[in-house]
């Protein structure tokens, strides 16, 4: 029995030694246990120049879009252009049937001849009456009556001449021409359609697209931030100092010409809190069309800003924090203010850090304020893909 008891004691002792050995191994593998200091990647913050971008949806319109409407009623007799054609100012687009108007011209010409004959007769009558009045053969009253007849005949002649001018103008209106250079829109009416000045839809539109206008909206806060630091005594002068903008097309490509922001509305939309703005782009090749869409990309140049990796920060109730390593290699939980722009991996820090600060950039979920770490310095993270160093 004594032998069995001794064997049992030795077995228990071996088990305790084995457990103690495993425990010591586990403590050695975990830097947070056994008094060991863990190693963490640390990055020193240095100022950089970057360009951020703001993007705004936009709709495109030509410099001038004119509705083509008939001035006179008539049936469309000919269409000289096709939808989408480029036309020049004064080029004939449509011809209306002019038979009725030609008849009006002939009638007006005949009325002029009648009126001219009446004027001639009245002048003869006046010429006959004046000597008779001088000889007291007829009264002054009869002379005044003759003069009145002449004035009436002259007025009728003037009326007939006006009718002829109006009929000839209407005849010219049957040939509908383009008031500007540009591209033809769609045709809601075809040959044989009866049209007039009161039709609901225009015959077509002509869009002058040599210069395109991109309309977009900016919320009031962004507009104030955009223009606050710009030189200028008024909004137009400030806008003139904005950098050139890009137009991102629906296929995600960038339009080859730079644009310039020209105007901003003087009224804030009370429903959306937005301000309407307009940028202009040259379009000599006609690649852009009225009614198109895209995105305005406005660059923002930032000099000597501090950047931190987004993975190196965490957020609590809308506030961002990072772990700063002090001179004793202890971490300090530090709040920071950031610009949440179009950077994919980085934040722009506006306050909370200074140049030369070192922050932990990896494994921050295992850290606690005041912990001591073994810092391992790493290079500062490169800029995001959609940001680039500023040359200004």
Image (cartoon, rainbow, N blue to C red):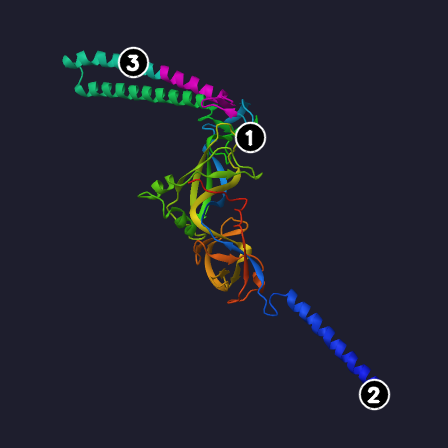
Q: Residue at x 46, y 27 (%)?
A: 72
Residue bounds of the magenta highlight: 86-113
Q: Earlier in the sequence, mark 2 or mark 3?
A: 2
Q: Marks 2 and 1: CB-CB under 8 Å? A: no
Please provide percent x and percent y for residue 302: 43, 46
Nearer the viewer's eye, disc 1 or disc 3?
A: 1
Nearer the viewer's eye, disc 2 or disc 3?
A: 2
Rendered image: mark on residue 189: 1
Label 3 neighbour load within 10 Å: few <14, some 14-19, many 20+: some
Q: Residue at x 47, y 24 (%)?
A: 176
Where disc 1 sits, the SS reads loop
Residue to which mark 3 is pinned: 121
| Residues at marks 2 and 1, CA–CA distance in whole angstroms | 118 Å
Where disc 3 sits, the SS reads helix
Q: Marks 1 and 3: CB-CB under 8 Å? A: no
Residue to which mark 2 is pinned: 2
Nearer the viewer's eye, disc 2 or disc 1?
A: 2
**247 part of magenta stretch:** no
Is residue 304 found left or right of 57 in the rendered image? Answer: left
């Amino acid at each position: 029995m004594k032998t069995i008891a001794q064997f049992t004691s030795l077995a228990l002792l071996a088990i305790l030694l084995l457990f103690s050995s495993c425990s010591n191994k586990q403590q050695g593998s975990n830097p947070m246990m056994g008094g060991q200091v863990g190693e963490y990647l640390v990055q020193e913050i240095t100022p950089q120049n970057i360009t951020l971008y703001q993007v705004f949806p936009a709709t495109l319109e030509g410099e001038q879009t004119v509705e083509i409407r008939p001035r006179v009623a008539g049936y469309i007799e000919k269409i000289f252009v096709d939808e989408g054609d480029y036309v020049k100012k004064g080029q004939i687009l449509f011809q209306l049937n002019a038979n009725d108007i030609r008849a009006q011209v002939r009638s007006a010409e005949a009325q002029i001849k009648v009126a001219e004959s009446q004027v001639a007769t009245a002048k003869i009558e006046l010429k006959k009456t004046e000597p008779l009045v001088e000889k007291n053969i007829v009264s002054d009253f009869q002379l005044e009556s003759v003069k009145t007849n002449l004035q009436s005949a002259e007025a009728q002649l003037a009326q007939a001449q006006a009718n002829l001018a109006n009929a000839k103008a209407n005849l010219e209106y049957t040939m509908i021409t383009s008031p500007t250079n540009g591209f033809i829109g769609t045709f809601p009416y075809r040959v044989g359609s009866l049209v007039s000045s009161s039709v609901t839809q225009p015959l077509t539109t002509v869009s002058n697209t040599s210069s395109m206008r991109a309309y977009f909206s900016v919320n009031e806060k962004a507009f104030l931030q955009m223009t606050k630091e710009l030189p200028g005594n008024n909004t137009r002068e400030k806008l003139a100092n904005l950098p050139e903008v890009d137009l991102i097309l629906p296929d995600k490509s960038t339009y080859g010409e730079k644009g310039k922001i020209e105007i901003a509305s003087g009224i804030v939309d009370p429903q959306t809190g937005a301000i309407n703005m307009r940028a202009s782009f040259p379009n000599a090749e006609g690649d852009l069309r009225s009614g198109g869409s895209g995105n305005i990309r406005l660059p923002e140049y930032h000099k000597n800003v501090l950047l931190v990796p987004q993975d190196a920060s965490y957020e609590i109730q809308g506030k961002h924090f990072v772990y700063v390593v002090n001179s004793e290699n202890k971490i300090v939980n530090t709040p920071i203010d950031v610009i949440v722009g179009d950077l994919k991996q980085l934040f722009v820090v506006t306050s909370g850090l200074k140049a030369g600060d070192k922050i932990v950039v990896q494994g921050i979920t295992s850290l606690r304020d005041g912990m001591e770490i073994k810092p391992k310095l790493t290079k500062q993270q490169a800029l995001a893909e959609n940001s680039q160093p500023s040359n200004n």
